[in-house]
Image (spheres, rainbow, N blue to C red):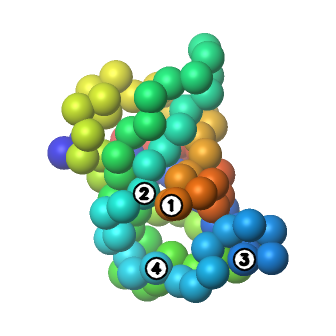
Amino acid sequence: MTKRKADIWLGPASAGGLSSPLPSGTHSMLLYFVKDGPRDPIGVVITSADGGELRPDGSNRQMTLEFWSPEADSLPESGSVFAIWYSRFVGVGVLTGP
């Protein structure tokens, strides 16, 4: 699986985000990249550096993204912005490095 670093922001429930924290390593998230037009969603596992929960508190946190879908072979470059989908759009992020 391809791994990348990213800064992510998970919005609180009041802003349409997650209604409760998710365990680090949740497999059910999709990322939508929009640079150069819409792209197909890419399946991802999001893991926090400390193994703590993914909290919908509106804070920015650096995470490790582990892509499980074949589309990851053509990932955009660092600096690319994405939306995070988990039954609905729940946050945003930016790729920061390998």
User: Who comes first in sequence, dot 1 or dot 3?
Assistant: 3
Residue 6 image point, x, y percent: 51, 51
Q: Is residue 71 left or right of residue 59?
A: left
Label 1 with label 2: CB-CB less than 8 Å = yes
Q: Is residue 62 left or right of residue 59?
A: left
Residue 2 image point, x, y percent: 25, 42
Amino acid beneath label 3:
Ala
Q: Residues within 10 Å of mark 1 (few under 14, many from 20)?
A: some
Amino acid beneath label 4:
Leu
Label 1 with label 4: CB-CB less than 8 Å = yes
Compared to 81, does 88 lie above or below? below
Label 3 with label 2: CB-CB less than 8 Å = no
The tag on residue 29 is 2
Q: Which residue is mark 3?
A: 13
| Mark 3 element type | helix
Q: Which residue is mark 1?
A: 86
User: Who comes first in sequence, dot 3 or dot 4?
Assistant: 3
Q: Nearer the viewer, mark 3 or mark 4?
A: 3
Label 3 with label 4: CB-CB less than 8 Å = no
Compared to 23, does 31 lie above or below? above
In percent of the image, x 39 and y 39: which residue is there?
42
Image quadrant occupied by the C terminus: top left
Choose between 20 and 61: the one closer to the eye.
Answer: 20
- CA separation in Å, label 3 and label 4: 13 Å
The tag on residue 35 is none
- CA separation in Å, label 1 and label 2: 5 Å
Q: Which residue is mark 4?
A: 22
